Image (cartoon, rainbow, N blue to C red):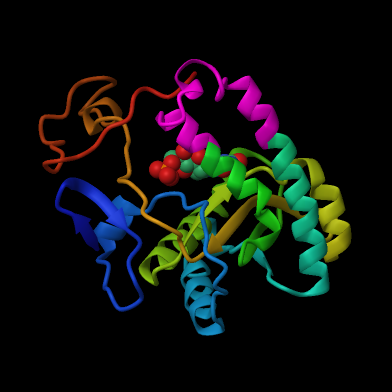
Amino acid sequence: MTRDATDPGATDPAGPDQLVTLLDGLCTTRSIRRFTDDPIPDDALATMFFAATRAPTGSNRQPFRFVVLREGPAARAAKALLGESFRALWADKRAADGYDVGSGADDDSPKARTARTMQRFVDRFEQTPVVALACLVPWRGLDPTVGASVYPACQNLLLAARGLGYGGVLTLWHAVVEDDLKRVLAIPDEVVLAATVALGRPEGRHGPVRRRPVQELVFDDRWERPAPWAVEPDGTRHTGRPPR
Ligand SMILES: Cc1cc2nc3c(=O)[nH]c(=O)nc-3n(C[C@H](O)[C@H](O)[C@H](O)COP(=O)(O)O)c2cc1C
């Protein structure tokens, strides 16, 4: 991991020649939405999807499948559908969450920077080097525990990407075009699209992971009892409480 001495916990995406330890990778994997146009070579994709498919699932049933979209005709059609959907859903979120009001009116505010990154991400969605549709093949009725057998594989994929100097983001903005995607990609009706993971070579610098303090999230012995042993590394950066 590369650390910026002036900003503890900040990370630059590691180059392929830089080893990222498992724990560093876990603590520094951001959502990456700004990509260069570099393709991801086959050998890197092979490593990433091998790691993804080693993830645990309930009873080792492995009910997930990844449909990987690159440059083929079906992939282009699917990316176009996704791009439209992403742009529409981001526009809704931008308005609903007030990205352009309050501090968002200041171009230098974190809110305005996030909005610019999101807008660029959706505007260029079709150029995203690799898009992986994480699919669930349900073997019984759909409930949250069924979905739990897809997301560890998605996180393995993102961590493996980080380990190789790539990055990505898990999104759920495919839902409104799910039926069209299934038609274009010959995905059976009973299969559920659980996530869309965009992947590529990160562009620019990405700040540190920020979460709530561990003490707010981890309790000892009973609900909301502080865990005295849950001590954070020096320099840990925090975020405020998320919106309800
Ligand atoms: C279940 C889940 C759903 C998400 N859905 C979206 C999404 O639809 N669009 C998007 O841009 N990011 C999405 N994300 C990424 C989160 O917004 C991101 O992880 C979070 O804001 C923290 O940012 P960081 O990963 O850069 O620290 C999702 C992440 C998860 C785990």
Q: Is residue 53 left or right of residue 183?
A: left
Looking at this rendering, what residue extends furthest in the top direction? 102
Foreground: 42 or 230? 42
**Residue 84 drawn above or below residue 45:** above
In the picture, the quarter occupied by the N terminus is: bottom left
Find out whether residue 187 is within the magenta segment. no
**Residue 64 drawn above or below residue 87:** below
Where is residue 13? Give x, y as percent: 35, 61
Q: Is residue 157 left or right of residue 119?
A: left
Residue at 36% in and 76% down: 16
Q: Which residues are magenta?
A: 90-115
Foreground: 229 or 208? 208
Find out whether residue 93 is within the magenta segment. yes
Residue at 37% in and 22% down: 241
Residue at 65% in and 47% down: 122
Where is residue 222? Give x, y as percent: 25, 23
State which quadrant residue 159 falls in: bottom left
Looking at this rendering, what residue extends furthest in the bottom direction? 43
Residue at 54% in and 81% down: 41
Where is residue 226? Give x, y as percent: 18, 23
